[in-house]
Image (cartoon, rainbow, N blue to C red):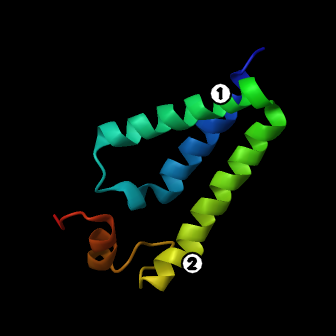
Protein backbone atom coordinates (compact mmCIF):
# COMPACT_ATOMS: atom_id res chain seq x y z
CA UNK A 1 0.00 0.00 0.00
CA UNK A 2 1.12 3.55 -0.70
CA UNK A 3 1.44 5.82 2.36
CA UNK A 4 2.19 9.10 0.60
CA UNK A 5 -1.25 10.42 1.52
CA UNK A 6 -0.49 9.99 5.24
CA UNK A 7 2.98 11.52 4.82
CA UNK A 8 1.48 14.52 3.00
CA UNK A 9 -1.11 15.08 5.73
CA UNK A 10 1.44 14.81 8.55
CA UNK A 11 3.91 17.06 6.70
CA UNK A 12 1.24 19.69 6.05
CA UNK A 13 -0.01 19.65 9.64
CA UNK A 14 3.55 19.80 10.97
CA UNK A 15 4.41 22.74 8.71
CA UNK A 16 1.31 24.69 9.68
CA UNK A 17 1.82 23.82 13.34
CA UNK A 18 5.43 25.00 13.30
CA UNK A 19 4.48 28.27 11.62
CA UNK A 20 1.52 29.05 13.87
CA UNK A 21 2.62 27.51 17.18
CA UNK A 22 6.41 27.35 16.87
CA UNK A 23 6.83 29.87 19.70
CA UNK A 24 5.78 27.14 22.13
CA UNK A 25 8.91 25.16 21.21
CA UNK A 26 11.47 27.97 21.17
CA UNK A 27 13.31 26.54 24.18
CA UNK A 28 13.36 22.95 22.89
CA UNK A 29 16.50 21.68 21.24
CA UNK A 30 16.44 21.34 17.45
CA UNK A 31 17.21 17.63 17.48
CA UNK A 32 14.25 16.93 19.81
CA UNK A 33 11.94 18.82 17.46
CA UNK A 34 13.21 16.82 14.46
CA UNK A 35 12.96 13.48 16.30
CA UNK A 36 9.39 14.31 17.34
CA UNK A 37 8.38 14.78 13.70
CA UNK A 38 9.91 11.45 12.65
CA UNK A 39 8.32 9.61 15.58
CA UNK A 40 4.92 11.12 14.80
CA UNK A 41 5.33 10.29 11.08
CA UNK A 42 6.44 6.72 11.80
CA UNK A 43 3.66 6.09 14.30
CA UNK A 44 1.08 7.48 11.87
CA UNK A 45 2.27 5.24 9.03
CA UNK A 46 2.44 2.24 11.37
CA UNK A 47 -1.16 2.81 12.46
CA UNK A 48 -2.30 3.22 8.87
CA UNK A 49 -0.42 0.11 7.73
CA UNK A 50 -1.62 -2.15 10.53
CA UNK A 51 -5.08 -0.84 11.41
CA UNK A 52 -6.10 1.09 8.31
CA UNK A 53 -6.59 4.65 7.19
CA UNK A 54 -9.68 5.14 9.37
CA UNK A 55 -7.59 4.51 12.50
CA UNK A 56 -4.95 6.90 11.15
CA UNK A 57 -7.62 9.61 11.18
CA UNK A 58 -8.78 8.53 14.64
CA UNK A 59 -5.16 8.91 15.79
CA UNK A 60 -4.97 12.40 14.23
CA UNK A 61 -8.23 13.38 15.92
CA UNK A 62 -6.95 12.09 19.25
CA UNK A 63 -3.70 14.05 18.90
CA UNK A 64 -5.65 17.18 17.95
CA UNK A 65 -7.86 16.74 21.01
CA UNK A 66 -4.81 16.43 23.25
CA UNK A 67 -3.19 19.55 21.76
CA UNK A 68 -6.43 21.53 22.09
CA UNK A 69 -6.82 20.32 25.67
CA UNK A 70 -3.34 21.52 26.54
CA UNK A 71 -3.73 24.90 24.85
CA UNK A 72 -7.33 25.63 25.82
CA UNK A 73 -7.51 24.14 29.33
CA UNK A 74 -4.20 23.03 30.89
CA UNK A 75 -2.06 26.07 30.05
CA UNK A 76 -4.71 28.62 31.16
CA UNK A 77 -5.27 26.57 34.33
CA UNK A 78 -1.58 27.16 35.11
CA UNK A 79 -1.75 30.89 34.32
CA UNK A 80 -0.30 30.78 30.79
CA UNK A 81 -2.07 32.08 27.69
CA UNK A 82 -2.66 29.08 25.39
CA UNK A 83 -2.12 31.11 22.22
CA UNK A 84 0.81 33.41 23.09
CA UNK A 85 2.59 31.37 25.82
CA UNK A 86 2.67 34.47 28.05
CA UNK A 87 3.82 35.23 30.64
CA UNK A 88 7.03 33.70 29.30
CA UNK A 89 8.53 33.20 32.75
CA UNK A 90 5.62 31.05 33.86
CA UNK A 91 5.58 29.08 30.59
CA UNK A 92 9.34 28.44 30.78
CA UNK A 93 8.90 27.30 34.36
CA UNK A 94 6.18 24.82 33.31
CA UNK A 95 8.44 23.44 30.57
CA UNK A 96 11.50 23.31 32.86
CA UNK A 97 13.49 25.71 30.69
CA UNK A 98 15.81 28.46 31.82
CA UNK A 99 15.00 32.00 30.65
CA UNK A 100 17.65 33.18 28.18
Q: Earlier in the sequence, mark 1 or mark 2?
A: 1
Picture layout, residue 25 above or below residue 96 = above
Judge the density around disc 2: few (<14), some (14-19), many (≥20) Cα neighbours within 10 Å. some
Q: Which residue sits at x=77%, y=47%?
A: 58
Res 91 visible: yes
Comparing 87 with 63, the one in front is: 63
The quadrant in which residue 43 appears is top right
Q: Residue 46 carries which label?
A: 1
Q: Which residue sits at x=28%, y=69%?
A: 92
Res 7 visible: no
Task: Indicate left or right for 69 with 81 as reference.
Answer: right
Q: Residue furthest right?
A: 54
Picture layout, residue 17 above or below residue 74 = above
Task: Indicate left or right for 51 with 37 as reference.
Answer: right
Tell me the SS state at disc 1: helix
Q: Which mark is residue 73?
A: 2
User: Where residue 64 sits in the image (x, y, percent)?
Assistant: 66, 56
Q: Quadrant of the C terminus?
A: bottom left
Amino acid sequence: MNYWFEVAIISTLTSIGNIVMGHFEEGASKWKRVIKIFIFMGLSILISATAGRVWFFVFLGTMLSIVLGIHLWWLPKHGVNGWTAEPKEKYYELRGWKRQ
